Image: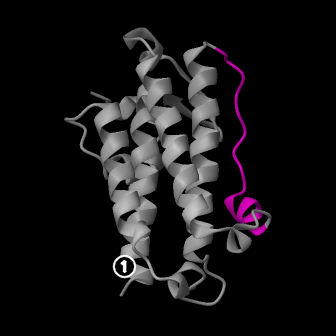
């Protein structure tokens, strides 16, 4: 089980959203199932809905989750392979602005996330217990590979909670 000394306090907001009694793989599967079930049945008029001026659309939120999954996967691979190079953060608003998310087919976004998550699950299945204990620095914060494993699901759950609370009322 991941411990709080494996990640910066900033990440606690995400990691607390997952079941730490379950494996990384189980959390990845469960959060992806919830993601798909929540978003697959949305009506088309919801895709580009913003709950407030300047906030992301649901399509932009989904694209952000996809972008972040890719970035977290690279970080996971780097740290598991014992690469000590500190990895930079990324400007989520800049990425979203340049993502073209609102011009994409929503079903394609859902499929992309499903396939991407399958790749993430396979990545974690390939890692040894020793690999999971490796750590590195991302966004100037230290984190273990194991904590990153839970962070994938926690980040996804955070945004799904926002969608439920702000977009689907």
Q: Can residue 12 be seen in this view?
A: no
Q: Is residue 45 visible?
A: yes
Q: Which residue lies furthest to the right in this view?
A: 98
Position of residue 22 in the picture relative to residue 48 (left or right): left
> Main SS of the magenta segment?
loop
Position of residue 55 in the picture relative to residue 17 (left or right): right
Where residue 154 appears, x then y in whole percent?
Answer: 39, 50
Where residue 13 appears, x then y in whole percent?
Answer: 39, 54
Q: Nearer the viewer, residue 161 or 91?
A: 161
Residue visible at 36% across and 67% down in the picture = 38
Colour mode?
one colour
Q: How crowded is mark 1: few (under 14 residues within 10 Å), some or many (20 or more)?
A: few
Residue visible at 32% across and 30% down in the picture = 2
- Secondary structure at numbered mark 1: helix
Residue visible at 61% across and 31% down in the picture = 75
Looking at the rendering, in which quadrant would you find the N terminus?
Answer: top left
Say which residue label 1 marks.
165
Q: Which residue lies furthest to the left in this view?
A: 21
Please give the range of residues in magenta: 83-97
Position of residue 83 in the picture relative to residue 155 (left or right): right
Where residue 168 appears, x then y in whole percent?
Answer: 39, 83
Looking at the rendering, in which quadrant would you find the C terminus?
Answer: bottom left
Specify the quadrant of the image occupied by residue 69: top right
Where residue 117 appears, x then y in whole percent?
Answer: 49, 41
Tell me: residue 55, above or below residue 19. below
């Amino acid at each position: 089980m991941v411990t709080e000394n494996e990640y910066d306090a900033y990440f606690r907001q995400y990691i607390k959203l997952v079941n730490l009694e379950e494996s990384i793989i189980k959390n990845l599967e469960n959060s992806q199932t919830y993601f798909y079930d929540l978003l697959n049945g949305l009506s088309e008029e919801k895709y580009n809905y913003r709950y407030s001026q300047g906030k992301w659309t649901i399509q932009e939120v989904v694209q952000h989750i996809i972008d972040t999954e890719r970035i977290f996967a690279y970080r996971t691979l780097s740290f598991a392979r014992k690469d000590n190079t500190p990895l930079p953060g990324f400007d989520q608003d800049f990425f979203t602005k340049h993502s073209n998310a609102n011009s994409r087919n929503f079903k394609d976004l859902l499929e992309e996330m499903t396939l991407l998550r399958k790749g993430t699950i396979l990545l974690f299945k390939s890692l040894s217990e020793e690999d999971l204990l490796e750590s590195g620095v991302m966004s100037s914060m230290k984190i273990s590979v194991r904590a990153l494993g839970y962070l994938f699901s926690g980040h996804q759950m955070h945004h799904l909670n926002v969608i439920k609370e702000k977009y689907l009322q």
